[in-house]
Image (cartoon, rainbow, N blue to C red):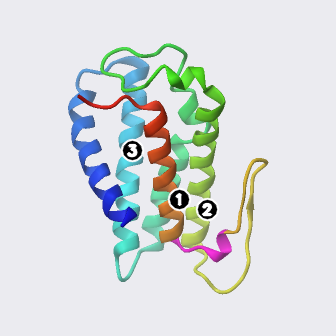
Amino acid sequence: MFKRIFTAFAIISLASTALAHDKATGIVKERMDGMGVLSTAMKSILAQTQSKTPDPEALKEAARAIQDHAGEAMTKRFPEGSLDYPSEAKEAIWQDWTRFQHLAQQLDLLAKGLEFAAANPLTGKRAELQDNRMLMDIGAMGPDEVFTLLGKNCVACHKEFRAKKN
């Protein structure tokens, strides 16, 4: 169910974002381009998790692409007040900067978890990826489960910090 909702969300988001990118400049264009990379990576992960024969290398590549645009790489693309048209960022980002940073860091951690899960198919072993804010037992998760958490993270951030399209 979540995968179908996320697929529709990703397709609509990618189509509308492509049009907006033409008018963006500076840091707004840079972050919109980064969000485009995230969208493409998520679509790739979705395709792999739905495949009967997922390609671990494709999953790892998509996970690394997310890592390249998550965490501090994401937050640095949101200097305070950077709301120039056609930015879809809300003022709420800077009003609750701690929450925004947490979601960006969580995205990075989940992408690392996906990369690990793709490289280490479930074998009954327990493996942990630890961060000072979060501990995940990803040894008990497959790429599809980590993908679901990634999608929920994206949706939470968009719901809180992205303006709705008219």
Residue 155 lies, in percent from the top left, at: 44, 46
Query: In this figure, which residue is indicated by the disc labeled 3?
Result: 37
* Quarter of the picture holding the C terminus: top left
- Marks 2 and 1: in contact by CB < 8 Å? yes
**Which mark's residue is nearer the viewer, 3 or 2?**
2
Residue neighbourhood size for the residue with mark 3, other residues' Cα within 10 Å, grouped as few (<14), some (14–19), many (≥20)? some
Asked if 77 appears above or below 62 in the picture, the reply is above
- Front residue of 1/34: it is 1
Alpha carbon distance from label 1 to label 2: 10 Å
Q: Label 1: which residue? A: 149
Q: Amino acid at mark 2?
A: Gly
Q: Quadrant of residue 146?
A: bottom right
Secondary structure found at label 1 = helix
Q: Is residue 120 left or right of residue 10?
A: right
- Amino acid on which the number 3 mark rests in the picture: Val
CA separation, marks 3 and 2?
18 Å
